[in-house]
């Protein structure tokens, strides 16, 4: 049975239960890698048996016990291979023979999922490894699905995930919730990874599609889980609000052929009012608590955009002020780039171009296609078609996203046609 033929209800249930069971098994067994293998085998068994025999009354407990049996079988095989003494074997099997009731052993549903999130986002891992491991262990995506999202071969992604698990194992990090300063440090990594996963899903950095809804949906699901477990944390609420307010525009971001539609040209009737209301409520509550963080500020900016009935109704002075606070709080050149756009909307395109000059010296953004794309937009607003065309074309050459490349190329072509300028690569008439 393949994922394509598996009953959708069973598939959704298995994806939801996988991180909960993995967390419980890893906590009991102490070996993350072995626990994941055992849970994967249990999931395969469930996919084969449940459609025919029905979903058990306690599906989570069923998966947990099957996974423990798989670990027991592997341990028995390993012990036989090493020909350990019978006395040692007896002692080990006696320890594993007693399995407490699932509701006692597994504990609260969210606890182990949260521990998995924190383990997968250990600071020792690179961001790419942390994202991949999070999607695999907590998100329930297969190695093939993750490889497709990152546009790499499945074998390459399998090696990346294996190295990440080996790093966790060699680090000796216990399968427990970190406390105090360590927890605060790890929470920042967790939020950053979820933020990156969502961004990659909402605006894919490369490939033929503008959006990867499987990734953005997974990031939202994980952010909801984290918010359920840490409801008083303002930055967790801010990140979830940011995701919801941004994702609310998803249906309006692309046209019939998958082409990119910029924010000011979107049909706002297609925006999701329920997601907007939920996001606004979340960020409003978080901001009212007094301690303001970067995700809350980004969510507040998204809320200002979403609450404008028309593009011309957008409160750009408020957005500019929020970006000013955010820029002082975080050393992120993308924030400065967005602030330059807001400055242009409030004070004019020339002010926006002036604000961009400082970014030319920032090596993190030098040569980035968005810098050229914004310059092209601002020169177009000033009526300087020649410079706008040059920047649009430069941006189109640098982006790896096909929808963004096509959008930028079309912008340049339309300006060129309007000025009777031949497109790049063709002789002038």
Image (cartoon, grey):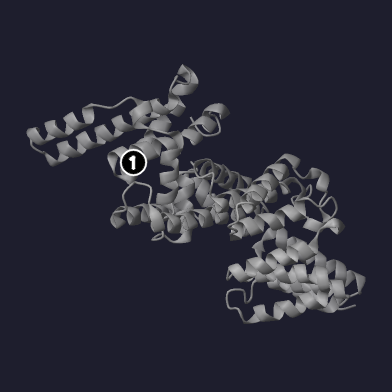
**Residue 241 vs residue 165, the one in the foreground:** 241
**Residue 253 placement (x, y as % from top left):** 75, 51
Left or right placement of residue 274 versus residue 85 in this view: right
Question: Which residue is painted at 51% across and 49% down in the image?
Answer: 146
Question: Which residue is painted at 40% across and 50% down in the image?
Answer: 119
Compared with residue 328, is residue 20 higher up or lower down, i.e. above or below? Answer: above
Evaluate whether residue 425 shows in this view. no
**Residue 428 placement (x, y as % from top left):** 87, 78
Evaluate whether residue 339 shows in this view. yes
Left or right placement of residue 258 versus residue 164 in this view: right
Compared with residue 423, is residue 68 higher up or lower down, i.e. above or below? Answer: above
Residue 339: which quarter of the image? bottom right
Q: Which residue is mark 1?
A: 26
**Residue 53 placement (x, y as % from top left):** 45, 17
How packed mark 1 is, by other alpha carbons closer than 10 Å (few <14, some 14-19, many 20 or more), is many
Left or right placement of residue 267 versus residue 216 in this view: right
């Amino acid at each position: 049975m393949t994922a394509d033929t598996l009953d959708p209800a069973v598939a959704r249930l298995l994806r939801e239960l996988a991180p909960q069971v993995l967390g419980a098994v890893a906590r009991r067994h102490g070996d993350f890698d072995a626990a994941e293998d055992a849970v994967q085998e249990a999931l395969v068994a469930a996919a084969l048996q449940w459609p025919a025999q029905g979903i058990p009354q306690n599906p989570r407990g069923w998966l947990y016990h099957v996974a423990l049996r798989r670990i027991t079988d592997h341990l028995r095989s390993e012990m036989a291979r090493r020909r350990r003494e019978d006395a040692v074997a007896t002692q080990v099997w006696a320890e594993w023979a007693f399995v407490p009731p699932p509701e006692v052993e597994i504990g609260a549903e969210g606890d182990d999922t949260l521990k998995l999130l924190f383990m997968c986002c250990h600071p020792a891992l690179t961001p790419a490894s942390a994202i991949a491991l999070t999607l695999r262990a907590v998100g329930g995506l297969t190695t093939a699905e993750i490889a497709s999202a990152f546009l790499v071969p499945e074998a390459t992604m399998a090696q990346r995930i294996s190295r990440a698990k080996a790093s966790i194992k060699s680090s000796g990090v216990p399968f427990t919730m970190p406390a105090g300063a360590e927890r605060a440090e790890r929470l920042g990594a967790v939020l950053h990874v979820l933020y990156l996963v969502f961004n990659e899903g909402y605006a894919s950095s490369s490939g033929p599609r503008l959006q990867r809804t499987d990734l953005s949906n997974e990031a939202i699901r994980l952010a909801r889980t984290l918010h359920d477990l840490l409801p008083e944390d303002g930055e967790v609420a801010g990140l979830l609000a940011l995701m919801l307010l941004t994702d609310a525009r998803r249906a309006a971001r692309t046209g019939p052929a998958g082409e990119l539609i910029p924010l000011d040209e979107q049909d706002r009737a297609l925006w999701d009012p329920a997601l907007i209301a939920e996001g606004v409520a979340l960020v409003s509550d978080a901001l009212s608590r007094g301690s303001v963080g970067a995700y809350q500020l980004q969510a507040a900016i998204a809320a200002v955009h979403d609450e404008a009935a028309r593009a011309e109704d957008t409160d750009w002075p408020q957005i500019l002020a929020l970006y000013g606070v955010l820029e002082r709080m975080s050393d992120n050149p993308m924030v400065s780039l967005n602030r330059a756009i807001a400055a242009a909307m409030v004070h004019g395109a020339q002010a926006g171009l002036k604000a961009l000059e400082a970014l030319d010296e920032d090596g993190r953004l030098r040569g980035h296609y968005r810098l050229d794309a914004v310059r092209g937009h601002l020169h177009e607003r000033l009526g300087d078609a020649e410079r706008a065309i040059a920047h649009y074309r430069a941006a189109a050459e640098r982006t790896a996203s096909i929808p963004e490349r096509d959008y930028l190329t079309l912008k340049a072509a339309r300006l060129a046609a309007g000025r009777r300028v031949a497109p790049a690569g063709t002789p002038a008439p």
